[in-house]
Image (cartoon, grey):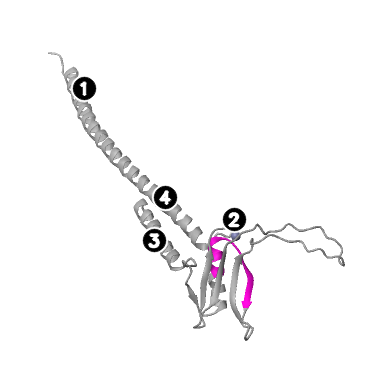
Amino acid sequence: MDLEAVAEAVENSAEIISAACEGSSIEEPNVGMEFQSEEAAKNFYEEYARREGFVVRLDRCHRSEVDKQIISRRFSCNKQGFHVRVRNKTKPVHKPRASIREGCEAMMYVKVNTCGKWVVTKFVKEHSHLLNASALPYNSLIESKDRIIQQLAKELEHQDRLCQHYRRQLFSLLETVDEQTKCLSTKVELVVNTVKKLENEVQKPLI
Ligand SMILES: [Zn+2]
């Protein structure tokens, strides 16, 4: 396989990966978005969180006064709020564990409407902390791989052009060598003939 074919193969695989990336992308939550159930809303927000690099915490809910069914739910980032230590006099005091909460306000709030659909009524996108790069989701990884593949393809193209340039130089050098060789062999032939002629003259009997 020559360099051009390699570059083409790399480019093709970059296209396939970016197509896969587009196919698996998930929308960002926005106010007015509807879901069939609380579970569907939760799954959606969890998928979004996985892509962004944070973890969802099932936060508070409200129930209907009539039938006690859940009518609204808040899904938060697990770094939401601040840890409050509750003193418990009956249990021995353990060394307090480091809290992961950082007062983050990122969340999605869903409410049941009159048609029974779960509608996003509030969405806070910004986090008060860095998102987890190691949990960085499939799409971001694909995007960075895609960039690397494109750089490699460019590099291959550049190397290929260099190769063609060197090939041309080599051919012209070979042509020059060929011409020189022909010229040299003509001269050698001339010298050989002259020497033969001289030998013949030397061997002629003196009159
Ligand atoms: Zn957060």
Asked if disc 3 and disc 2 are in contact, CB closer than 8 Å, the reply is no
Q: Quadrant of the N terminus?
A: bottom left
Say if 107 sits above or below 153 in the image: below
Instruction: Write the residue at 66% across / 61% down.
Output: 81
Element carrying mark 3: helix
**Which comes before the other along the chain, label 4 or label 3?**
3
Which of the labelled discs sits on residue 34, or is there none?
A: none
Q: Position of residue 195 (x, y in %)?
A: 21, 22
**Which comes before the other along the chain, label 1 or label 3?**
3
Give the residue pinned by disc 3: 15
Q: Residue furthest left?
A: 207
**Which comes before the other along the chain, label 3 or label 2?**
3
Q: Amino acid at mark 2?
A: Ser
Q: Which residues are magenta?
A: 45-62
Some atom of ligand 1 lies within 8 Å of the CB belonging to the residue at label 4? no
Which of the labelled discs sits on residue 128, or is there none?
A: 2
Say if 87 sits above or below 3 in the image: below
Asked if disc 4 and disc 3 are in contact, CB closer than 8 Å, the reply is no
Badge 2 density bin: few <14, some 14–19, many ≥20, Cα 10 Å: few
**Which comes before the other along the chain, label 1 or label 4?**
4
Rounded to the nearest angstrom, the CA distance separating label 4 from label 2 is: 34 Å
Q: Position of residue 123 (x, y in %)?
A: 53, 66
